[in-house]
Amino acid sequence: MAGPMNGRLAVFTKTPGRSPVKTRLAAELGEAPAHAFFARSVAAVTETVQAFLATHPGWTAAWHVAEEDAVDDPRWRTLPAAVWTGPGDLGARMARAWTAGLATHGASLLLGADAPQVDEGDLAEAAEALASGRTVLGPATDGGFWLAGGTAPLPAAAWTDTPWSSPDTLRRFRPHLGDPVVLRSLTDVDTAADIAPCLRAFRPPVRGARARAADWLREH
């Protein structure tokens, strides 16, 4: 298999109490349920990433925390490292993470912390794509993406000209990846209407923190 067998996974997150989280979901269900979902999602993603790292020893992972003063928060001690994303919009923050992975490990994966249905198989498929020298993309049903990765720098326009958090995000970003391996399409839970499709995307075995996240979705 050609290409790097090492890589760095950057998991983007916000810290409740320091930044608003799941604001549209909170507007519909209330702040407490929205925060409860976010906490369960973070725990599920944490377990999935830990399981992936256990079977991919050439990989490492780091929380990329939105708030500089929250990097030392105990909840971000669950992965090998936690770093501040740095200032700027989402594009600038992701560009830094992408560059960091290439510099230290030769391959970068970017992932959000609010997709509890992501499993170890998804990450393994992404790592395999990068090991073959391909880029990889996980599309989201809202027009964005839940994962992106590659083994080479992207044009600056990928980060500066893409409209983030927009129905056009995926359409504008994808051409910069060339011919990516495209993973399954998943739904981010931004509103109550997203709960059912998110729940349907859980693949067995569903246990541990992923099961607790699925239970929350089932209840709501």
Image (cartoon, grey):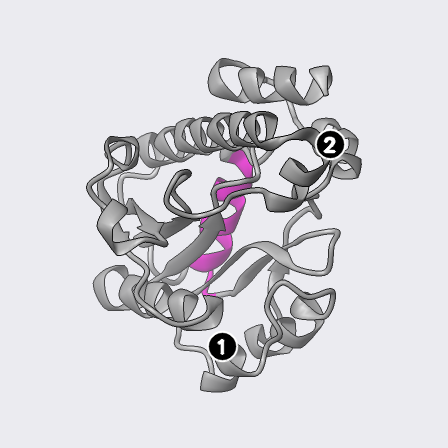
Residue 132, horizontal then vertical, whole percent: 46, 60
Q: Nearer the viewer, residue 41 or 203?
A: 41
Disc 1 secondary structure class: helix
Q: Quick check: can you spot residue 151?
A: no
**What is the x, y in percent for residue 72?**
19, 41
Q: Nearer the viewer, residue 32 or 193?
A: 32
Q: Quadrant of residue 167?
A: bottom right
Tell me the distance, in whole angstroms, between the alpha carbons under discs 1 and 2.
29 Å
Q: Which mark is residue 54?
A: none
Quarter of the image with the C terminus in it: top right
Can residue 157 be seen in the rendering of this structure?
A: yes
Report if residue 169 lies within the magenta region: no
- What mark, if any, has residue 195 been given in the picture? 2
Residue 78: percent from the left, percent from the top? 28, 31
Give left or right: position of 185 versus 105: right
Is the magenta region chiefly helix, strand or loop?
helix
Name the residue beneath numbered marker 1: 159
- The residue at the point 36 percent across, 54 percent down is 66
Which of the two discs, 1 and 2, sits closer to the camera? 2
What range of the chain is rendered magenta? 121-133
- Identify the image quadrant of residue 107: bottom left
Is-magenta flag for residue 123?
Answer: yes
Q: Is 198 placed left or right of 63 in the picture?
A: right
Q: How many marks?
A: 2
